[in-house]
Amino acid sequence: MNNNKNTADGEIKKEKTAPEKQVIADLQKKVLELEKKAAERDEYLNKYARAQADYDNARKRMERDMQQWRMMANESIMNDLFPVLDSFDGAMQTLEKEEKNASLLDGLKLIQDKFHKVLEANGLAVIKTVGEKFDPLIHEAVMKVASDKYADGIVTEEIRKGYALNGSVLRPAMVKVAVNEALPRKMSEDKAREKSKEDSIG
């Protein structure tokens, strides 16, 4: 009698555990499916991120190439304009010296100013010369001149204007540079006086 009861209890227990195992198996299956879908999702997101990065890099490269192309085009145009600019500025200087046709001169000055402003708006800048320290990167010395007015190595006169485009030198300015003969002589005199003082002290 007791044996039958134990057997019945065991069967009941087995009946209870079978559905539980099935539930656990189903849950594990669901978890595996979710993990697989999460991995697929991550892969798609990574592919999207890489595609987005490739697109951004391509766009930036295209913008950089366009900018370089514009700069090269501007440089070519500016170089072609320099002879016209030199002639125009030279003619204006001649007219100013002659002091004739004041009304014509005023009209030409307005045109000259507009011309220079258009060039400046496109990145062109005139290189500073007179009174500046000679710089071989932006100046081209065509002559050295003795000067008591300017210190040694200072630009005394501009022969031809120089220009820079967006900070890069397109054409160096042709200039005359001071050789101050008085300066070395003064230094020699100062040294002589200093030596004389030392000798008198000694």
Image (spheres, rainbow, N blue to C red):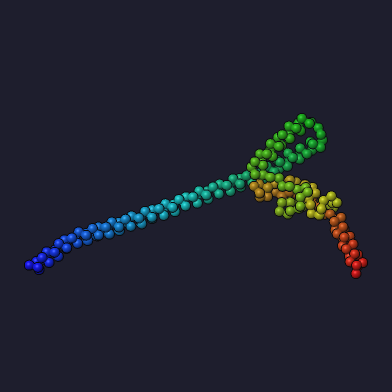
Identify the residue at image location x=72%, y=47%. Answer: 127
Given the current orientation, which residue lies at the most extreme bottom position?
202
Q: Is residue 69 above or below residue 29?
A: above
Of residue 164 and residue 49, the one placed in the foreground of this image is: 49
Of residue 20 and residue 142, the one placed in the foreground of this image is: 20
Report the side of 114 relative to 55 (left or right).
right
Report the side of 43 relative to 176 (left or right).
left
Given the current orientation, which residue lies at the most extreme top position?
103
Q: Quadrant of residue 187?
A: bottom right
Q: Quadrant of the N terminus?
A: bottom left
Rendering coords of residue 186 (x, y %)? 87, 57
Given the current orientation, which residue lies at the most extreme left position?
1
Residue 192 visible in the displayed image: no
Rendering coords of residue 116 (x, y %)? 69, 39
Rendering coords of residue 131 (x, y %)? 78, 48
Identify the residue at image location x=87%, y=55%. Answer: 182
Callout count: 0
Report the side of 40 relative to 138 (left or right).
left
Report the side of 111 relative to 97 (left or right).
left
Identify the residue at image location x=71%, y=53%. Answer: 137
Q: Is residue 34 above or below residue 100?
A: below
Residue 146 visible in the displayed image: yes
Q: Quadrant of the C terminus?
A: bottom right
Rendering coords of residue 147 (x, y %)? 84, 51
Identify the residue at image location x=36%, y=57%. Answer: 39
Of residue 102 and residue 183, the one placed in the foreground of this image is: 183
Q: Is residue 56 above or below residue 90?
A: below
Given the current orientation, which residue lies at the most extreme right position?
200
